[in-house]
Image: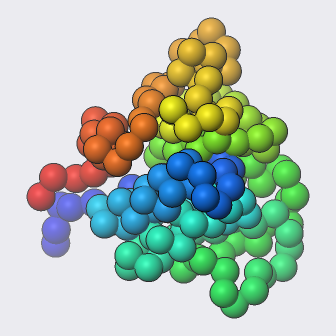
Amino acid sequence: MSNSPIRKPQVCVLGSAEPGSTAYELAGQAGALLARHGITLVSGCGSPATRVAAERAVAGGGLVLSIVPPDEMPPADWPATVVVPCGMGDARNLLMALSGDACLVIGGRAGTISEVCLAWLHKRPLLPLVGCGGWSDTLPSNPPDERKNSAILPWSGMAELESQLRGLQLIRVA
């Protein structure tokens, strides 16, 4: 019997960014990076940024868990290896926040802020993309509150993201 862990690390990808933006491209690269390192990507796949991250993770042979708000299965071309239709609408944001060992935050709107605050309350490290605009840009200097519940680890490119994931021990060294 092996002493190695069975459960793979899981990272939630939260946020929004439009196709053609730098944040959108970095979201896709982040998905590929997670797949390359055997990290399960958790995403609702509802925004262009979270969808491209999932698509690139699947294309890279990675696992993608998609927790979707309605109570029905999405179309067959949904970019996920496992889908959970929770039927909870926006209350699904708590499931998203709890499903990652850490949460990547890319841009974002009100739903992202909700997920980030829930992740913060439940002590999940936050990895906001900075330098590309959007709500995630302000997270390092404007955390959800004063409690310092979890680490806020900004990144602006793949080398920084990989370093932050190593620091969290989510990328395992063989």
Residue 84: tell me if it is visible: yes
Task: Count the numbered circles shown.
Answer: 0
Which quadrant would the C terminus be assigned to in this image? bottom left
Report the residue that reaches farthest toward the left: 174
Residue at image position (47%, 46%) is: 101
Report the residue that reaches farthest toward the top: 146
Residue at image position (57%, 66%) is: 52
Q: Residue 172: horizontal and vertical position, in percent?
A: 22, 53
Q: Residue 153: horizontal and vertical position, in percent?
A: 43, 29
Up/down of 77 relative to 164, above or below? below
Q: Residue 137: horizontal and vertical position, in percent?
A: 59, 29
Up/down of 84 relative to 142, above or below? below
Instruction: Using the image as rendered, state which of residue 119 and residue 80 is in the foreground.
Output: 80
Up/down of 20 relative to 106, above or below? below
Which quadrant would the N terminus be assigned to in this image? bottom left
Q: Quadrant of residue 68?
A: bottom right
The answer to whether 80 appears left or right of 7 in the picture is: right
Instruction: Using the image as rendered, state which of residue 98 and residue 66 is in the foreground.
Output: 66
Q: Residue 108: horizontal and vertical position, in percent?
A: 70, 42
Residue at image position (68%, 32%) is: 135
Residue 99: tell me if it is visible: no
Residue at image position (48%, 26%) is: 152
Q: Quadrant of residue 76?
A: bottom right
